[in-house]
Image (cartoon, rainbow, N blue to C red):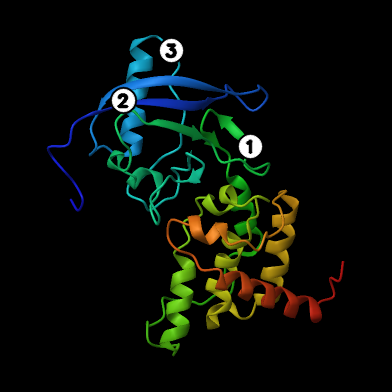
């Protein structure tokens, strides 16, 4: 493994973890100590060690979201020392290794902070707002029949590459957590761009962007801050260029739309 050191000494750490029993109960930071943490552990494996200690002590373990633990699904949404997914750029929490920290460090671990992402319990948040935005228009409903040949529709390589790059968004919500206004513009723009750039997405491009923007606003996400913290903290490198595409698509749709509200 690149950057690994099998001879690295175990670490003792102090963890300040957000504990919140449920949505209706006020939460607070709680301090824990963990010992003999291997630098080769992932961040989630370190939390597993903490939870084993808590269970042995008869204490409720810390709830946190995860699934694939391979940096693919985007479920491992944690705010670590004031940064989405932690200190390593281009990395999800599950792929963040403890060698990025030092013996004796204090690590603050919080859930995503956004009104549109209510806390379920502890570090676990409800990101279903993203699902509802996708349901509002992030799809192609045209019946294409059977599976077409990959080369049947000629698409310039630069367009295909840009659409693919937008499609790599894993919907983790790091952009929302990083933005001071809790904006979802980077996420929505990636989902709009990946379809708007391709021929298959052209028939519904106007209704798609209108409906997704409308749903984004209904969910309570904030306005774009124009700072770029969303792209800076995105673990898969979604470009701010997609927000420009989203704005162009929205203005174009509104210019010819009957929905002028």
Q: How far apart are labels 3 and 1 at the CA level?
A: 24 Å
Residue 175 position, x and y percent, is 55, 54
Secondary element at image label 2: helix
Disc 1 crowd rating (10 Å Cα; few below 14, some 14-19, many 20+) is some
* Vertical side of 260 occupied by 92: above or below: above
Secondary element at image label 1: loop
Q: Quadrant of the C terminus?
A: bottom right
State the residue at coordinates (35%, 23%): 50
Residue 188 position, x and y percent, is 61, 62
Q: How far apart are labels 2 and 1 at the CA level?
A: 26 Å
| Viewer-nearest residue: 169 or 81 | 81
Disc 2 crowd rating (10 Å Cα; few below 14, some 14-19, many 20+) is some
- Is residue 220 rendered to the left or right of residue 45? right
State the residue at coordinates (58%, 62%): 228
Residue 36 position, x and y percent, is 24, 24
Q: Which residue is mark 1?
A: 118
In the rendered image, which quarter is residue 14 located in? top left
Q: Which residue is mark 2?
A: 49
Q: How far apart are labels 3 and 2 at the CA level?
A: 13 Å
């Amino acid at each position: 493994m690149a950057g690994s050191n099998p001879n690295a000494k175990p670490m003792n750490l102090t963890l300040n973890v957000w504990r919140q029993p449920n949505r209706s109960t006020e939460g607070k930071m709680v301090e824990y100590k963990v010992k003999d943490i291997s630098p080769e552990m992932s961040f989630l494996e370190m939390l597993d060690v903490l939870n084993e200690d808590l269970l042995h002590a008869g204490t409720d373990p810390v709830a946190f979201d995860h699934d694939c633990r391979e940096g693919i699904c985007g479920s491992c949404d944690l705010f670590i020392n004031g940064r989405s997914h932690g200190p390593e750029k281009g990395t999800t929490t599950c792929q963040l290794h403890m060698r990025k920290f030092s013996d004796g460090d204090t690590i603050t671990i919080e859930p995503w902070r956004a009104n549109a992402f209510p806390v379920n319990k502890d570090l676990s948040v409800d990101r279903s707002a993203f699902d509802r935005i996708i349901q509002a228009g992030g799809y192609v409903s045209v019946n294409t029949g059977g599976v077409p040949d990959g080369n049947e529709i000629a698409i310039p390589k630069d367009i295909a590459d840009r659409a693919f790059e937008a499609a790599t968004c894993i919907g983790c919500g790091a952009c929302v957590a990083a933005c001071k206004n809790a904006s979802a513009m980077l996420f929505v723009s990636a989902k709009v761009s990946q379809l708007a750039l391709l021929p298959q997405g052209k028939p519904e491009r106007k209704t798609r962007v209108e409906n997704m923007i409308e749903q984004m606003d209904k969910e309570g996400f904030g306005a774009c801050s124009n700072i770029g913290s969303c792209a800076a903290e995105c673990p898969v490198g979604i470009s701010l260029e997609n927000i420009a595409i989203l704005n162009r698509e929205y203005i174009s749709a509104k210019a010819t739309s009957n929905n002028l509200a």
